[in-house]
Each structure stands twice: as C-alpha cells, then as structure tokens.
Amino acid sequence: MKMTTMGLRERKKQKTRIALIDAALDLFLSQGYDITTIDQIAAAVDVSPRTFFRYFASKEEVALSLCRDGQEIFQSELAARPAEETPYQAVSQAIRAMLTALREGDPDEARRFDKARRLVECTSSLSAVQMCLIMESERLLTEEVARRRGTGVDDLHTQFAVSVFTAIGRVCFEHGPQDLALLAERLEQTLAIAERCLRPGWDR
Amino acid sequence: MKMTTMGLRERKKQKTRIALIDAALDLFLSQGYDITTIDQIAAAVDVSPRTFFRYFASKEEVALSLCRDGQEIFQSELAARPAEETPYQAVSQAIRAMLTALREGDPDEARRFDKARRLVECTSSLSAVQMCLIMESERLLTEEVARRRGTGVDDLHTQFAVSVFTAIGRVCFEHGPQDLALLAERLEQTLAIAERCLRPGWDR
DNA sequence: TTGTCATGTGTCATTGAGTGACATAAGTTG
DNA sequence: CAACTTATGTCACTCAATGACACATGACAA
C-alpha cells in the first residue's frame, strides 16, 4: 500500500469530514448549539442531511470529535511511556506530550481544537457528553495504572489514583484558557499543586 | 398553612410523580433505557405522554431525579457543617450524612435509589447526564470550599481540592455496590486511602 | 351548595434528531 | 470499457420534545 496518495475516494471523504466539522463548529459558536440544525450544517457543506449521519452518529459527535482525537493522542502517548515510570510520572508526561503534539501539529487543527473547547465550555449538554468521553478514556487509564501498580482494575487505591489523574486533567482543561501555550502553563501549575498535596510515593 | 395535609391536588401530583418514576425505572431496567418510549411509561401510569413532560423535562430527568435528590441532600448537609472544619472534614462528613439520611429515610425511597444507580451504571447515555449533575453540584462545592479556604473560586488549589472530592465520590458511587450498607463501607475504605495518599493539611 | 377562579390534563399539530431501505452516482480494479 | 465496490441522495418512518387550545377538576368564597 502506498502512503503518498490514498485514493481520490478516501481524500474526498477526509475533505467532507473536515468541512462538516468546520461548518458545525462555526454554526454552533455563532448561533448556539441547540438552535443549529443538522440541515443547516449539511446545507453549508452541500451534502444531504443523511450523509451527515454517515460521518457522525449524532449532533454531539461532530462537536466532540476533536476532544476524542485529543484523548486518543493522550492514550497512545501514555502507552508509549517506559514501564519503570510510576503511574503519576507516566500520566503527567503523557499529558505534556499531548499538548506538545497539538502545538507542533497542524495549526488549523489547533484552531479547531480551541473552537471545540470554547464551545464545550459554554454548552452544558456538550459538557455532559464530554464527560462521557472522559469516562471512556478513564477505563483505559484504569487498565494502564493497574498494570503499572500490579493490581486489578477493581483495586480501590488504583481507582483513587485514576480519579486523581482525571481530576488534574479536568482542572486544566475544563475551566482553562483556550490558548494552547497558556494551557501548558496551567498544566504545570496544577501538577505543582498536586505534588505539594500528595505524599511521595502515593501512586505506587 | 397546615403541614398535616397539603390539599388533594398536591397529593395527587406527588402520587403521579412517584408512579411515573417507578414505572420508568422498572421499564428501563427490564427492557433497557433506549428501547423504552415515553408512550410506554405514560401508558403504564395511565396518563397522556404530554403529561409526562409536565413532570419531567426529558426522558433522562425521570431516571436521574433520585440522583438529583441525593446530591441536594449532600449539598444541604455540607452547608450545615460547622465553619471550623477543613474542606475535607466537612465534605467527608457530609457524604456520610447523606448515606445515613438515605438509610434512615423511607425504605421505598432507598429501593428506588438502588434501582436508579443500577440503571445509570449500565446505561452510558445516563452516565453522561449524571456527570452533568455532578458538574453542577461541583460548582456549588467549589463555592463552599473557596469560602472555607478563603480563596476565590478561580484558585487552582481550591479547584484541585474540589476535583479530589469529586474523585472520592465517584470512586464510591460509580463502580460501587447497590446496597447502601456496603456503600457506606466502601466510602470509609476510600476515605482511608485518600488520607493515606494526601499530605496532612493539604486542603487548608 | 353553588359559582368563580386557578390549575392540571388530554388532544392535536409541529419541529428536529436519528434510522432503515433502496436506487443511483462515483471511484476502483481488471 | 466492463464489472464491482462504495458513497451519496431520496423517501418514509419512529420518537423525543414543545406549543396551543379546550376541557376537567380541585380550591375557595359567598
């Protein structure tokens, strides 16, 4: 298989997908999420409403597709951390890596990410679904932490550690600034606080 | 105003409300949440579908009304804690008080609470909305913690503390047993772990 | 009790999300 | 060019949710 080109069909699909995301985010931010209809989004990209649902299972999904991308980056960065690191070390490094990846990647993608975060921030129904994403990702995180701690996923201490990690992430991303540089700064401050509050070796 | 009786009209409304909740929970648990329609719930209580929406704003709300009740109990218990207590002391005592209130209250209510928790546990769309509730309640919690710590609600340390409290609550309630007695046990275990992980005075 | 007022409920119509079925158009491969 | 695969459009439908209006029922005063 060639990596240079991936067929006209596939490229068209990617293009439509991006166009749908951009149109949706812009409409959501300018008019409000609830008022905006699928028909409007589809019309803006000049596809049928039915086609929209072939790309995204729901109205929420198009808004949260970027958040999902971010979490997938985090998960893969986490899996790549060396096994010697404690859970806390691995998780904090993985979050840093995710932010770095976003800052060094496609600038358009970073702008979309900002838009998505601004949108979720001011739309309660989306905040709820975002939390659903976080909970999914939390399950994977639990497995990873359990592995590093050598416990099962039902271990209370492991679950507590995972919840603390989620807490750190939420403090950063939920009420944080849109700008990725400021976000990285806020992350460091939050991690510093966490380290001041937690006993050394708490995550072992 | 008399407290003994509260008028036939009001009593009828309470009765319909309870009946709708019970019918909904039973249908949701037996058939599944998504498959169950408003029409079925309304038919089971022998009211029109339109009336359902006069009691509950959405299909989700009827399922989560008990969770909301629980959180309101928590909030009022928290507000009643003496001002000298640290945030952690106040919050942990408030959670204990909430569980106690549920165990000592109406047994029917406790059974509904169990059903609701079981339902939310196995229905991802409801988990999402429950998280939305938790986030609402988190805003109030942030104000309370900020007051006790003498900071603004934007203080990072305060936000971290609140997130840790939420983490404790989620470890208990989310993957916990249905039974209220076992739940209280799990709470104590979780609190013990938290105290072992956190530095003394971390919440000051 | 009766008449008046307020309020809860049923019926009807409508919007919008989401899905299944089927025909057609477009890209892929030989 | 032909045969195949896959994306899209159209149509019809279910269900959640809301507004409007008429009607029934409980509350309350004379």
Image: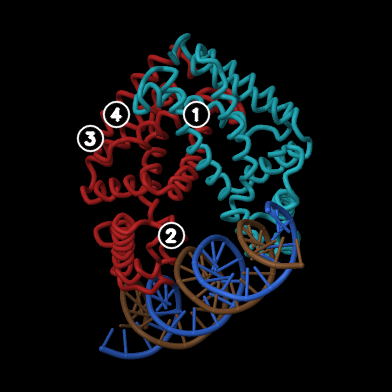
Chain colours: A cyan, B red, C blue, D brown
Residue D6 in which image quadrant? bottom right
Please state which amino acid type lies under the numbered disc 2.
Lys
Of the pair B84 and B179, the residue shown nearer to us: B179
Instruction: Name the spot of residue A66 as percent of width and height, x first.
Output: 65, 41
Q: Chain of mark 1?
A: B
How many numbered circles does the render carry?
Answer: 4
Horizontal side, residue A96 vs residue B133: left or right:
right
Residue farthest toward the top in the current orientation of the protein: A200
Amino acid beneath label 1: Val
Q: Which mark is residue B181?
A: 3
* Lower position in the chain sequence, tag 1 or tag 4: 1
Please state which amino acid type lies under the numbered disc 4.
Arg
The residue type indicated by label 3 comes to Ala
Which of disc 3 and disc 4 is earlier in sequence?
3
> Mark 2 and 3 residues: CB-CB less than 8 Å, in contact?
no
| Location of mark 1 (residue) | B162
Q: Report the residue marked by disc 2.
A: B59
Mark 2 and mark 1 residues within 8 Å of each other at the beta carbon: no
Q: Which residue is mark 4?
A: B186
> Circle 4 marks a residue in which chain?
B
> Alpha-carbon distance for marks 2 and 4?
31 Å
Inter-mark Cα distance, 2 to 3: 30 Å
Q: Chain of mark 2?
A: B
Residue B150 picture location, percent across and down: 55, 23
